[in-house]
Image (spheres, rainbow, N blue to C red):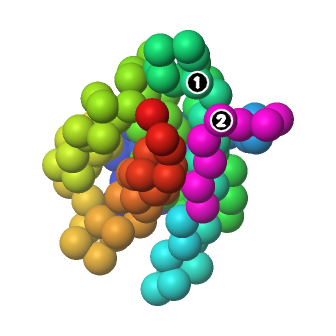
Amino acid sequence: MAFYTEKIIDHARLPRNFGRIPNPDLQFEEFNPLCGDRIRVEFRLGARGDVIEAKFSGEMCAIAKGSASILLASVTGMESAAIGAISDAQVLNDLGGPIETARVKCALLPLAALRGAIRGASL
């Protein structure tokens, strides 16, 4: 992991929000066929449609795991409209440093799963 930022390494080794939510309100699984990474995101929502709990699980590389940990920690407390406005650039910036072009899809896999969950919701 020498090419990863300290932030990615920290979140990949000790991921925040890793696990499953019993009976989640929203869930979505995304798969990257190029590398085999698979991520599932799950959310519990409050009465106003805000995220009160966010978790992820799956088999993924360190960049995807670190990105998922950072991203899901940031969406707790947000409402769906704000979550839907999260950009690719914002996620990449939050990783704390440049990502190789070949690894950008890995870094954005958690955001793709989050977007799938929001699209599937009738909030």
Q: Quick one: SS at disc 2?
A: loop
Say which residue label 2 marks.
Answer: 25
Q: Which of the 4 image quarters holds residue 107?
A: bottom left
Residue 96 point in image, percent of width and height: 27, 39
- Range of magenta residues: 22-29
Label 2 vs 1, first from the N-terminus: 2
Q: Is residue 22 left or right of residue 71?
A: right
Residue at far bottom of view: 34
In the image, 6 versus 37, the foreground residue is 37
Q: Is residue 28 magenta?
A: yes
- Can residue 82 be seen at all in this image of the molecule? yes
Nearer the observer, 59 or 21: 21
Query: Along the horizontal axis of the image, is 72 left or right of 79?
Result: right
Establish if 108 lies above or below 118.
below
The residue that appears at 48% across and 41% down in the rendered structure is: 122
Q: Nearer the viewer, residue 112 or 19?
A: 112
Q: From the top left corner, tell me how far across and down residue 117 is, in percent.
A: 50, 49
Residue 54 in percent (x, y) is at 59, 31
Mark 2: few, some, or many residues within 10 Å (few <14, many ≥20)? some
Quadrant assignment, res 30: bottom right
Residue depicted at 58% across the width and 55% down the height: 28
Q: Is residue 117 above or below residue 73?
A: below
Q: Is residue 97 visible?
A: no
Residue shown at the point (42%, 52%) measured from the top left: 119
Rendered-image quadrant of the C terminus: top left
Task: Determine the residue located farthest toward the front in the rendered image.
Answer: 122
Find disc 1 in the rendering and name its residue. 45
Q: Amino acid at mark 1?
A: Leu
